[in-house]
Image (cartoon, rainbow, N blue to C red):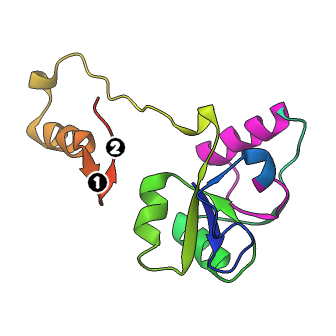
Amino acid sequence: MLVTSCDHELSTVENVKFSEALKYEFVGLQDGSALQEFLTDQAARMGVRFQYRVRLPSAEAVCRMVERKVGVAILPIATATRLTHVSAIRMAELDELWASRKLLICTQSFADLPSYAQHLVNHLRDDTVNGVDRGQS
């Protein structure tokens, strides 16, 4: 999801192309973040370089800076949705095939996992986390 301040030019759109978002300065996660590396690779494939205004250690810090109009950000939907309850931010879905990722949990035998690991897997497999539809696995 693209995250913007409430009065940003893109705050009223429901969907946005990655190429359009790249026209703005970004607030990103710090070096080494898997998400930022992935986004940097996607931008490089388009021949574009990210314009980072600042890079921060957490999604919460990113949203605070977005709220203060430092730039825009791209965050996972569950994270962005959770943070809309504590920050004055807006979300727009990225209109790109690669923007929807399917994450998998792999184990040789679920029954052989310790009970705490089974509880974790069950929690992660819940269809709804914080009101966000996560789909079926």
> Mark 2 and mark 1 in contact (Cβ < 8 Å)?
yes
Check the image and report above or below for 125 versus 72: above
Q: Position of residue 134 (x, y in %)?
A: 34, 43
Instruction: Examine the structure image and report whether residue 27 is included in the region drawn in magenta.
Output: yes
Which residue carries the number 2 mark?
Answer: 134
- Mark drawn on residue 129: 1
Location of residue 116 in the rendering, given as x and y in whole percent from the top left corner: 14, 43
Q: Secondary structure at mark 1?
A: strand
Q: Is residue 20 above or below residue 136?
A: below
Q: Nearer the viewer, residue 105 or 92?
A: 92
Taking the spot 52% from the left edge, 71% from the top edge, the residue there is 60
Q: Does the rendering let one see residue 58?
A: no
Q: Verify whether residue 26 appears in magenta.
A: yes
Q: Amino acid at mark 1?
A: Val
Give residue 38's quadrant in the image: top right
**What amino acid is at disc 2?**
Arg
Judged left or right of residue 37, residue 77 is left
Q: Quadrant of residue 44?
A: top right
Q: Which residues are magenta?
A: 21-45
What's the CA distance linking mark 1 and mark 2?
A: 7 Å
Q: In the image as oriented, which residue stretches furthest toward the top?
A: 108
Badge 2 marks a residue whose secondary structure is loop
